[in-house]
Amino acid sequence: MEGASLAPIPVKSSGPISYADAGVDISAADRSKDKIKLLARRTFNKNVLSEIGSFGGLFGLDLSKFPDPVLVSSADGVGTKLKVAFELGIHHTVGGDLVNHCVNDIAVQGATPLFFLDYLAMGKLEGNVVEKIVTGLSDACKANGCALIGGETAQMPGFYQPGDYDLAGFIVGAVSKDRIITGEKTQVGDVLFGLPSTGLHTNGYSLARKLLFEVAGYTADQYVGAIKEKTGAALMKTHRSYLGIIRKLHAGDCVAGMAHITGGGISENLPRVLPKGMGAHIDLTSWQVPPLFTHLQELGQVEQDEMFRTFNMGIGLICVVPADKVKKAKAILNRANERFHVIGRVVRGDRKVSYA
């Protein structure tokens, strides 16, 4: 009615309402941050100029190592591999998955990883889970010579289901301008070296989980003869870092281009480092596809093209080696005890991959 005022809505409360009543425990977050600081400090070096907890992380670039520096950055997540981690209660490996994935993404361009930041979000903060995740991040950063200088741990009640969380990361590296690897020097006849993956790494999990858990009806702790291990163990193998061997090959000037085989598989990642007018031919007989991938294909009658643009098929890194550097590249790989396969060649084409 005109002139009428709205009556206040009565609120029932037994007393003052806090942030904790809304599902966000600041005290628990503070306790977790103290543990995170200790884990992050293990990765610090002389270039880290700030403490964990600052509004921004400070990092001093050593120009003596990079005379004409170019910064290289990448961001990524762990994806639905986290669903398997939730089911198994395994949280210490996903941090390594994330760091190694990001490290590989910039290393294939010749970059040295400098620092890393993470984003961890969950409905209710569980201190023991946070500590396991950040331990994995810290261990992987330290192994890759990368400083964990900051991040965000967010409590989002009502957004995530109990026990669920999401994890993403951001990395920055550097390379001198004349040492950037772009693939532009690739030529027809260059040889493709494939380095083995450790399972699915962090891609293709939505299809893999559907095939293993829905189509086949396996449980995560079930031993499967076709893959010779438990389903969960096969899916939770850590995404490996190729940084060490990439550095050796790069120092020996043995690579014209490199492709980290992630989402999109070989079919969509290898063309990213092929110049215009060139393609790649892959010899399918040159390596034995691990049983996990062949079993997935059998379970869903998945087409070959779909397999090669969804999964890495046992090849996590492809190096484009100039024909006159093949012998040297093989010697470097053998000295490093690094397994590899010569899987194909660069051919004339329209930046597509053919298989035979």
Image (tube, grey):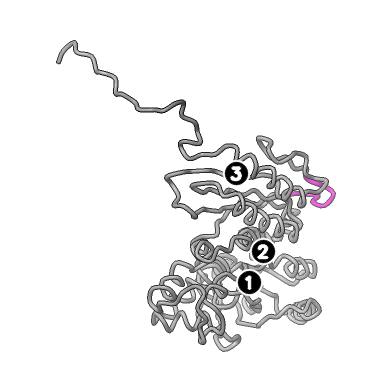
Q: For residue 166, which numbered disc appears in the image?
A: none
Locate residue 180, reporting x and y percent: 70, 58
Q: Which residue is mark 1?
A: 317
- What is the secondary structure assignment of the residue under circle 3? strand
Q: Is residue 47 magenta?
A: no
Mark 2 and 3 residues: CB-CB less than 8 Å, in contact?
no
Q: For residue 108, which numbered disc appears in the image?
A: 2
Locate residue 137, reporting x and y percent: 66, 56
**Residue nearest the observer in this picture, 122 or 189:** 122
Give the quarter of the image for residue 247. bottom right
**Residue nearest the observer in this picture, 166 or 189:** 166
Q: Which residue is mark 3?
A: 152
Magenta highlight range: 61-69
Q: Nearer the viewer, mark 1 or mark 3?
A: 3
Q: Is residue 62 above or below residue 203?
A: above
Label 1 vs 3, first from the N-terminus = 3
